[in-house]
Amino acid sequence: MKDYIRSVLDVVADSPFVPLEMHAKKGVLAVEKLSEAMEAYCKGDQVLLNERTEEIDILEHDADKIKQKIRASIPSSIRLPVNKKDLLSFLKQQDSIADFAQASAYWMTLRPCKNLPDEIKEGFLELMAASLKTARLYKELVGELYKLLATSFSKEEIKETMQIVPEVERLEHDVDVLETALLKKIFEHEDALGGAGVCHLIGLVEKVGGVADKSASAADRLRSMIIRR
């Protein structure tokens, strides 16, 4: 059976799995740049923030091009070791990581960080660090996926990879906790921040936290894809 459902990497040069890890790396690199953008935002460095936002925009665009390449490399004549619909669903969630990084950076450029209480700045930096940690672990998970595809899914490799998924989900839960704590701090300073300021910061919390949420969603789709193969 293993010989029959062999890796498509041995069948075609333009396998959809070849650029899959590259796509994930683009998304996580965008999150790395977002972390730098967040530091610039909290320091009030608008020039650096704009530079990082442009870099994130390029990475997101690169990820989109890779995504299209992957979609185009799944002809009906090729037998894949996973369900094609599951693969595309998984890819969509993975692609959202770069999307949320881009949206977060754009959102920061819309309203300068002025007179923001230190505890809120610290909250955003902590939230960003936790989201980045989640995305990095997700990238590790995708690296393991690539290895699985190259070896046609041995049971031992599946078991080992699955152990990473709950850890990604645990990190995402930690991000949820940080989001709630940060939102509470924002509302505590509502009078000083003003309605527009509160609205802007809430949106930023949701977008930065969304990076971790999409990382966990992609990990869950990955697990489903392997289980349903």
Image (cartoon, grey):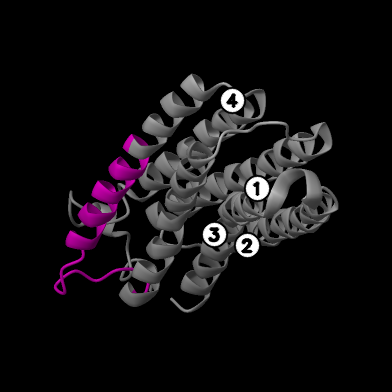
Left or right, residue 152 beside residue 140: left
- Distance from the alpha carbon under mark 4 to that under mark 2: 36 Å
Question: Quadrant of residue 44 in the image?
Answer: top right
Q: Would you place residue 45 above or below residue 4 in this image?
A: above
2 vs 3, front mark: 3
Which numbered tag is attached to residue 214? 3
Q: Which residues are magenta?
A: 58-83
Res 47 seen here: yes
At label 4, which amino acid type do we have? Ala
- Distance from the alpha carbon under mark 3 to that under mark 4: 24 Å
Tell whether position 66 is magenta.
Answer: yes
Mark 1 or mark 4, which has the lower sequence index? 4
Crowding near pointer 2: few (<14 within 10 Å), some, many (20+)? Answer: some
3 vs 4, front mark: 4
* Circles 2 and 1: CB atoms closer than 8 Å: no
Which numbered tag is attached to residue 162? 2
Crowding near pointer 3: few (<14 within 10 Å), some, many (20+)? Answer: many
At label 2, which amino acid type do we have? Met
* Circles 4 and 2: CB atoms closer than 8 Å: no
Label 4 sits on residue: 40
- Which element carries disc 3, helix, strand or loop? helix
- Which element carries disc 1, helix, strand or loop? helix
Label 1 sits on residue: 197
What is the quadrant of the C terminus in the image?
bottom left
Where does the image place residue 54, in percent across and percent down from the top left?
A: 37, 31
